[in-house]
Image: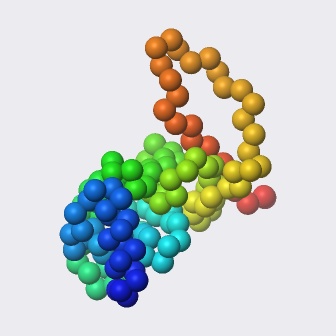
């Protein structure tokens, strides 16, 4: 891990008031170490951290991603009931999900126009609106 990557990772963890443990730093370096946004699955991140030579269990990866989300550092994007991605970009924005590869990417937010939503039940407010556009190759 380069000094710049380590510093960026520590700053990111500090934004969420999270202690920079060895495991958190290893995962943060892969998520934000180069300053780019990421869409990852827990399994994909686990494989990436193992490839660096760090020893982190899959359960630790899941728990750490949950802690990052709870701290407001990233958000979970659920594509279907069984598949979750974790996104380091925190502003509201739509996503493309490519069914053939399972890849999730940002979609151009400026091209999305939501003109109306259904009436919300009394006593409730919208917490979040997720837009995932599922894509498949034409036959």
Q: Nearer the viewer, residue 118 or 103?
A: 118
Q: Is residue 58 visible?
A: no
The quadrant the N terminus occupies is bottom left
Q: Residue at x 51, y 11 (%)?
A: 122
With respect to residue 81, does 23 lie above or below? Answer: below
Q: Nearer the viewer, residue 64 or 55?
A: 64
Q: Position of residue 39 (x, y in %)?
A: 51, 62
Q: Residue at x 52, y 58 (%)?
A: 89
Q: Position of residue 134 (x, y in %)?
A: 65, 50
Q: Is residue 38 left or right of residue 4?
A: right
Q: Position of residue 73 (x, y in %)?
A: 40, 56
Q: Nearer the viewer, residue 114 or 81?
A: 114
Q: Position of residue 19 (x, y in %)?
A: 22, 63
The quadrant the C terminus occupies is bottom right
Q: Residue at x 62, y 17 (%)?
A: 119
Q: Is residue 106 visible?
A: yes
Image quadrant assignment for residue 114 = top right
């Amino acid at each position: 891990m380069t000094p710049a990557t380590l510093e960026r990772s520590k700053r990111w963890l500090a934004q969420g008031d999270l202690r920079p443990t060895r495991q958190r730093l290893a995962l943060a370096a892969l998520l934000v170490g180069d300053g780019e946004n990421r869409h990852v699955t827990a399994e994909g991140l686990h494989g990436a951290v193992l490839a660096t030579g760090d020893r982190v269990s899959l359960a630790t990866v899941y728990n750490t991603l949950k802690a990052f989300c709870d701290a407001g550092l990233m958000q979970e994007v659920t594509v279907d009931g069984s598949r979750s991605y974790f996104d380091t970009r925190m502003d509201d924005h739509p996503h493309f999900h490519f069914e053939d590869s399972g890849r999730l990417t940002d979609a151009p937010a400026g091209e999305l126009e939501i003109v109306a939503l259904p009436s919300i039940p009394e006593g409730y407010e919208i917490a979040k609106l997720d837009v995932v556009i599922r894509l498949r190759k034409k036959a």
